[in-house]
Image (tube, rainbow, N blue to C red):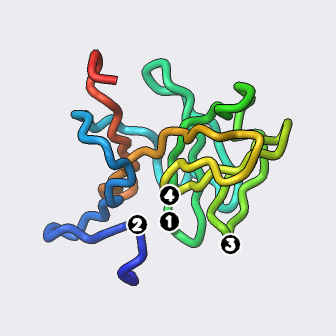
Amino acid sequence: MDSKSPLRQTKSGESMMAVRNSNETPTRKVQLLDVEEIPEGKAKRVEIEGSRIAVTRINGEIYAVGDMCTHANYALSEGPVDTEELTIECWKHGAQFCLKTGEAISLPATRPIMAYQLEIIQTSVFIHLPEKGSA
């Protein structure tokens, strides 16, 4: 893996996604999916503990972001994923978001979506969700 890859190897050989959120909100690890359940180059909606999350796999890297467009509350998982630019696009109005950071990178959206920290342990993908009451 190169130094720009969001996945890092731990000493025990597990892969761990680097933190993509700059805030220091306490999190807890929750099992999300098996790696093989995540589509390559397309988004899949997953609902976990009341949160809607869009998950995708691009060249072996896995990304998870909030599934609702901050412009008009449409599901991002229903829109296209750009595998070269690492973006997800709202199907309704075309707003694009960075899969690594959640940053809104095109209008009409101006507010970011949540980008989640992930860990891969063997074939299971775990997501770090904010502790209840801290979000």
Task: Compute the Cα span from label 4 to label 1.
Answer: 10 Å
Q: Position of residue 125 (x, y in %)?
A: 40, 49
Q: Are marks 4 and 2 in contact (CB under 8 Å)?
A: yes
The quarter of the image holding the N terminus is: bottom left
Q: Secondary structure at mark 1?
A: strand
Q: Is residue 109 above or below residue 71?
A: below
Q: Position of residue 18 (x, y in %)?
A: 33, 60
Task: Point out the tag, 2 or 3, that comes first from the N-terminus.
Answer: 2
Q: Are marks 4 and 1 in contact (CB under 8 Å)?
A: no
Task: Point out the tag, 4 or 2, that comes first from the N-terminus.
Answer: 2
Task: Point out the tag, 4 or 1, that comes first from the N-terminus.
Answer: 1
What residue did someone put label 4 on?
A: 100
Residue lying at the far right in this picture: please name it.
92
Q: Which of the pair 39/78 is nearer the observer?
A: 78
Q: Are marks 3 and 4 in contact (CB under 8 Å)?
A: no
What residue did someone put label 2 on?
A: 6
What residue did someone put label 3 on?
A: 84
Q: Which mark is residue 61?
A: 1
Task: Point out the tag, 1 or 3, that comes first from the N-terminus.
Answer: 1
Amino acid at pointer 2: Pro
Amino acid at pointer 3: Glu
Q: Secondary structure at mark 3?
A: loop
Tell me which residue sits at (55%, 36%) in the image: 66
Task: Compute the Cα span from label 2 to label 1.
Answer: 7 Å
